[in-house]
Amino acid sequence: MCALPEAERGFSRVDAVAMYSGALRDIIHTLKYEGRAGWAMIFGRLLVGWMDSHPEAMNGIDYVVGNPTHIGRQPIQHIEAIMDAAYTEDVNRAFPLSPPGAHRLVKHAETARSANRTLDEKRAAATAHAAALTWTGGISDIRGATILLVDDVFTSGSQLQHVALRLRATGAADVRGLVLARVPWSG
């Protein structure tokens, strides 16, 4: 994925807070699939801590948005919970995070999940996922913007790629990625 030209991959860079393995993998699963919302607060703190300690990567960012989950996702909309926690943790409003309930990127339709799928199935799910997204700000908000797109896990990169391409097609000038964890063999 990262060997593709930027115009094809959609994003200019992706940073990861940690590797997706061991206890971190288990805790992410606990939040996503068991709905233990307390972990969202901890992940929100991790994101804000990473942004605070990497000012060079945050330079020029106009919006920090989560790669959204469907509004009906059960047991929890984990990305939205993490982003809400990050906003709460950012007490000095140092970063352009959306307040809880006012997310800039929203997913209005449920699509197939990509977890435990083949690469081709992940790509198809990523295409459908990106097509189900809406930028809630006006076109003038996104035109020329640099967006930091946050997600929990970077596996194949397909979802980040398709969402970034969608944001660029809508008018964003640059999309960068920040993930809690990336699988060890992702590139």
Image (cartoon, rainbow, N blue to C red):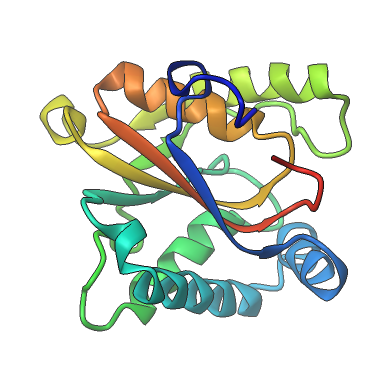
The number of numbered discs placed on residues in the rendered structure image is 0
Query: Residue 52 lies in what quarter of the image?
Result: bottom left
| Relative image position of residue 51 (x, y in whole percent) | 39, 68
Lateral position of residue 129 relative to residue 170, left or right: right
Q: Nearer the viewer, residue 133 or 9?
A: 9
Q: Nearer the viewer, residue 35 or 162?
A: 162
Residue at x 32% of width, y 43% of height: 147
Lateral position of residue 178 relative to residue 157, left or right: left
Query: Residue 119 lies in what quarter of the image?
Result: top right
Q: Is residue 98 visible?
A: no
Q: Nearer the viewer, residue 105 or 157?
A: 157
Q: Nearer the viewer, residue 46 or 56?
A: 56
- The furthest residue to the left: 140
Lateral position of residue 145 relative to residue 166, left or right: left
Q: Where is 67 relative to 52, above or below? A: above
| Relative image position of residue 5 (x, y in whole percent) | 50, 19
Q: Is residue 153 visible?
A: yes
Residue at x 47% of width, y 42% of height: 13
Lateral position of residue 53 relative to residue 163, left or right: left
| Relative image position of residue 50 (x, y in whole percent) | 46, 72
Residue at x 71% of width, y 73% of height: 36
Query: Residue 77 lies in what quarter of the image?
Result: bottom right
Q: Where is 179 relative to 30, above or below? A: above
Q: Which quarter of the image is occupied by the C terminus?
A: top right
Q: Which quarter of the image is occupied by the N terminus?
A: top right
| Relative image position of residue 33 (x, y in whole percent) | 79, 58
Residue at x 64% of width, y 25% of height: 126
